[in-house]
Amino acid sequence: MTFSVAEYVSTGGRSFSFEFFPPKTDVGERNLWHAINALEELSPTFVSVTYGAGGSTRDRTIRLTGRIAQETDLLPVGHLTCVGSTREELADIIDAYAAAGVHHILALRGDPPGGLDAEWQSHPGGLEHADELVTLIDSRADFTVGVAAFPEGHPEALSLDDDAKVLRAKQEAGADFAITQFFFDPSDYFRLVERASAMGVELPIIPGLMPVTNVSQIERFAALSGAAFPPALAERFHALGDDPEAVVDLGVEVAAEMCQQLLDQGAPGLHFYTLNRSSSTLQVFRELGLDSR
């Protein structure tokens, strides 16, 4: 492995990255490649392809991530969750990533197979927590391993301090960097960094952003993930009524303001949840002047 996102950020580099979700059809996969090609011109530090709900798109995710490694100049980060797999199956997936030239993995416990409202139950013969997955990945090959962090706390965390301790456990297991769940208040991110640092967490924490393109969709995502969609912000979007173009424009404006504040106050980069749409992310980059960096 010749490049590590963690080492790059730890030595002062800023990481700018994009996350896509795997389509369920061949047509959707072609559309995804259009979005990837549109964003490739921005020279992102890395791109990633997530799993579908309950690990439902695992095979397509692995295949797409390998294809990015083999057919583009982009650095792919492979997603891996504990959901629906035994330890042996997870080991096989890790080996498949390595064979495809993928040397960065984002290690996640994953959402409960029965949905976010269900109680978490590990797969028979599988793993219980993300730190166990980090340990398994490190035992297979020389990977740079990323993990999740939660500015407002994981929905199952007993407290924000306990949530920071979980992040520390991931670091102790071998995690190299973290990416946060999306959020809408930069102060939540900086409080997370401060909490984590007080707990001994030294790995870089990259903030995750999701530009608003559809109000009802973002409210649903926020409710499911436990992220707060601030009432004052929601009011600004609802005031636009049934005007999708105005919603997208405001989403770009709000995201650009957040990104600038995060960067100005020392965030080590930005990670965009694109929802497989490149236009809003491209516009945010232009607003920040990052498209010519």
Image: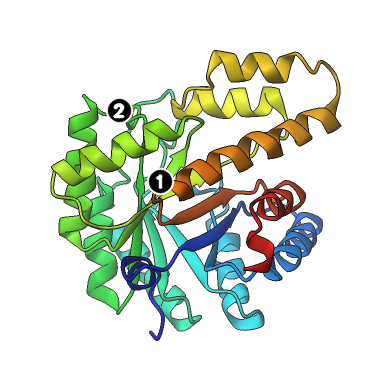
From this viewpoint, is residue 152 visible? yes
From this viewpoint, is residue 121 visible? no
- Reply above or below: 120 against 241: below
Asked if residue 278 lies left or right of residue 255, the reply is: right
Residue placed under numbered mark 1 in the picture: 265
In the rendered image, the quadrant that contains the N terminus is bottom left
Pick whichever, 65 or 198, lies toward us.
198
Asked if residue 188 lies left or right of residue 134, the reply is: right
- Dividing the picture into quadrants, the one containing residue 244 is top right
Q: Which residue is rendered at x = 19% and y = 46% of the image? A: 197
Where residue 53 sits: x, y (%)? 53, 41
Q: Which residue is rendered at x = 41% and y = 44% of the image? A: 180
**How far apart are labels 1 and 2 at the CA level?**
29 Å
Where residue 178 sits: x, y (%)? 35, 53
Q: Amino acid at mark 1?
A: Gln
Q: Amino acid at mark 2?
A: Glu
Q: Which residue is rendered at x = 22% and y = 53% of the image? A: 170
Considering the numbered disc 2 on the image, is that residue within a helix, a strand or a loop?
A: loop
Classify 10 Å Cα crowding around label 1: few (below 14), some (14-19), many (20 and above): few
- Dividing the picture into quadrants, the one containing residue 44 is bottom right
Considering the numbered disc 1 on the image, is that residue within a helix, a strand or a loop?
A: loop
Residue placed under numbered mark 2 in the picture: 156
